Structure formats: structure tokens, C-alpha cells
Image (spheres, rainbow, N blue to C red):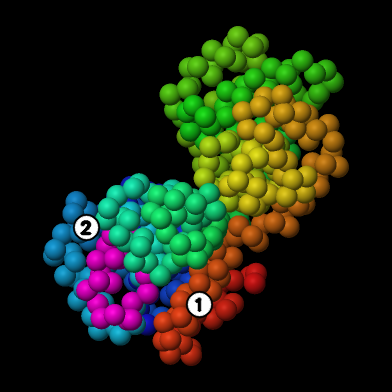
Amino acid sequence: MLFVLLDLHPQPEPSQQRVLALLRALVQTEPFTPLLICRKNSLLADRAAAEGLPMLALGSSRPLHPVSLLRIWLRLRPHRRVILQSFGEQAAVLANLLAARRRPGRTIVLHTRFFTPGMRRPMLQKSYAAADAIVCGSSTIAKLVQQENELPSDTFRIIPPGTKHSDYSERMAQRNGRVAICMPGALTEGHGQASLVHAMAALWQVEDLPPWEVRLAGTGPMFHFLLDEAQKLGVLDRLAILGEQDMHDVLPHCKLLVLPPGELVYAPALAGGWAVGLPVICPALPAAIELVRDGENALLVAPDNPQALASAMLRIIRDAKLAEKLVQGGRNALASVSEERMIADNFALCRELIASHTWVAGSSVPAQDVGAGQP
């Protein structure tokens, strides 16, 4: 049985780390024949080639060119049963085109929207409507896709994008007990940095706190506004804007992680904080509430509320037992956002769809525990 992963993004995307993780797992899952279809000269193609993973690279400028479609069709033709799983808008359209040219009942199509819902386009709507299932990284994304395309709710499956948490280092001790507070994300309106700067002003008025500072990891048009605001509030000397950073490098040098509002998926950011051993503060938004147990593995605060954010930061800084409880709760919750769990859930969905197509499953179904440390 051929299992094809399709990703036609010309530039690196967060979902591509998950594509590679699924491809690696499929290579070890007999008797599937895995195949990645992607753009030639893309970073995804380079990484797959470096690892010797099975791949068909299409022309980088026009991946849906008739010659490319013919190459793919010839690759699929010898296989009686094919699973097509797409990542991104162009890949969803391509999967639908390929399935439409095969005999009915011989192709299973999954579309995956881990991080973004996709734009409302006729071709994309047609692809969604023809899919056997649509995988979304959160219920928030699923609701957006469902509303935009008027699809039945049972088409959707929620699978958080998994993170390989072993890639993160443990938190490092800070000199003089310094409290480094980190917020990742683009410096754009609605991403919470302005609220955090105002929360800093409230924190600055509290006496008897250990040395502390805020680190913003990101770039964007609000850079100068945030500096000016920090200057007006008297907290500029406690603010560091680091620019675009690899969070694997930044988080181990911090003591508290504050996640910004406005995100549609919080799994990777939570996984990073939990893996490093940081207490985490999350905005009380649906995409975060799906994964967070307030007071157990993170604190939830009202978004864009500087006073509530300052209060939550103070609680963690002053209460060592609460901080340790959140850290331990985060470690216990890591399995829910792990790469292994994502792979296991994806394979479980495939088993379900194979059964619904009355294909002869037998040993052709991915093993329940392949690449999975959790049920």
C-alpha cells in the first residue's frame, strides 16, 4: 500500500518538521511504501534527500504542471491502494486531482491543517469536500475550516502537531537568581507584547523581588513602538528584544514562559516550555484551553489584560511551590504534544479510514505502537 505525503510549500513551514517525522515512521512501518512529494530545491527536499528518505521532487516553479502530474500519476499507477495526505493548500488541490484520476474506492485522502485554516478558494473548498478526513492542529482551526467550507463536523480530526521534546535542553541556573521572562512571537499588533510591557510596569512597582527582565524573541513592525512604550513606563532597562531566535537556544536560559494571544495552535510552544522545565502562562483562549489545565500545567490569564498577566507572573515568582507544580504538571502533559503521540494518532486515523473503505487491512495497517510511546 502506497502512503504519499504531499507538501508543496516553497519556503520552510512549521508543518514540514511533522511531515518528516511521519515519513521517518512510515519507512519503518511494513508493508507500507512511503513517498514524499515536494518541490525541488526546497528545504524539505534537501532534508529528505540528506536522510535518504523516499521522495519525488517536482519543478520548483510550477509543481502542478501537466508534466509533474503525469510523473506522479505514473508513480501511483502500479499501486492498487493509495493513501494521500496533504499539507498546505496546493498540496490539498494536488491530492484531490490525483484521487479524481484513480478508480473509485482505491484512494484515501486526508488533508492536514496543523497551523493555519487556509484561505477560502473554490478549488480548496472542492478538495476539502472530497476528503475522507481533515486533520487540524486544534479545534479552533477545525471550526474555521468547517464554517468557511460548510463541511460536516465528523470529517474533522484534531491531532496537535507533535514536537520532539528530547531536542530541548534542561533549564539552566541563572546568576543571582535572575528571573528571565520570555515571550516568543512576531512583534505585531494583537500578539501580546504591548500588554506584557504594561505588565512589566506593574511588576516594577513591587518591592523585594529578585532581579528580573523580559526577553521578546521575534521581529516585526512594533519593534520601535515597544521600545518607546517601555521608555515611557520606565522599564526599558529590563526589556531585551532578541529578534528571530531558535527557541531551543533561548528557553533553557529563561525561568518563565509567557505565550502570546492570537495563536491558533499552542502545542509546539507548550511542548518547548514543558520540555525545558519552565512554568508557563497562557492566554485563556480556546486553542490553549484544549491543552492546558489551569493551575496544574500552566496558568491561564485573560488575553490583553496587563494587570492579570502581572498578577500571574508575581504568583510564579513568589511561590516556588506553585512554580514547581506547574513544571511537574507540564512534564506530565508532554506526552499529549509529543511527536510520538502525533504519529500514533495519525496512524490510528488511517486504520479507521482503511476499515471504513473495507480494504483488506491485515498486516497492511500500521502497527498500533510503531513510533508511539503513548497510547
Residue 302 to residue 99: above or below? above
Is residue 218 something that shows in the picture?
no
Residue at x-position 71% and y-position 24% = 307
For this view, does 59 lie left or right of residue 140? left
Between marks 2 and 1 in the image, the one whose residue lies nearer the viewer: 1
Q: Residues within 10 Å of mark 2 (few under 14, many from 20)?
A: many
Closer to the camera in the image, 241 or 228: 228
* Image quadrant assignment for residue 131: bottom left
Which quadrant would the C terminus be assigned to in this image?
Answer: bottom right
Which residue is at a point 83% across and 41% down the rendered structure image? 322
The answer to whether residue 336 is magenta is no
**Mark closest to the chain's N terminus, 2 or 1:** 2
Of 153 and 186, the residue lying toward us:
153
Residue 347 x %, y %:
51, 73
Given contact means CB atoms under 8 Å apart, are the residues at marks 2 and 1 in contact?
Answer: no
The local secondary structure at tag 1 comes to helix
Q: How far apart are marks 2 and 1 (CA)?
A: 31 Å
- Seen in the picture, residue 226 relative to 374 is either above or below; the reply is above
Q: Which mark is residue 352?
A: 1
Question: From this viewpoint, which residue is outermost toward the top?
Answer: 232
Say whether residue 105 is magenta: yes
State left or right for residue 180 relative to residue 144. Answer: right
Measured as percent of width and height from the top left, residue 297 is found at: 73, 49
Tell me the residue that label 2 is attached to: 63
- The residue type indicated by label 1 comes to Glu
Where 359 sits versus 263, above or below?
below
Residue 369 or residue 136, whichever sits in front: 136
Instruction: Report whether 44 appears left or right of 366.
Output: left
Point out the stretch of residues depicted in magenta.
Answer: 90-109
| Picture residue at 34% right of the left edge, 66% below the top | 130
Q: Residue extending furthest left?
A: 67
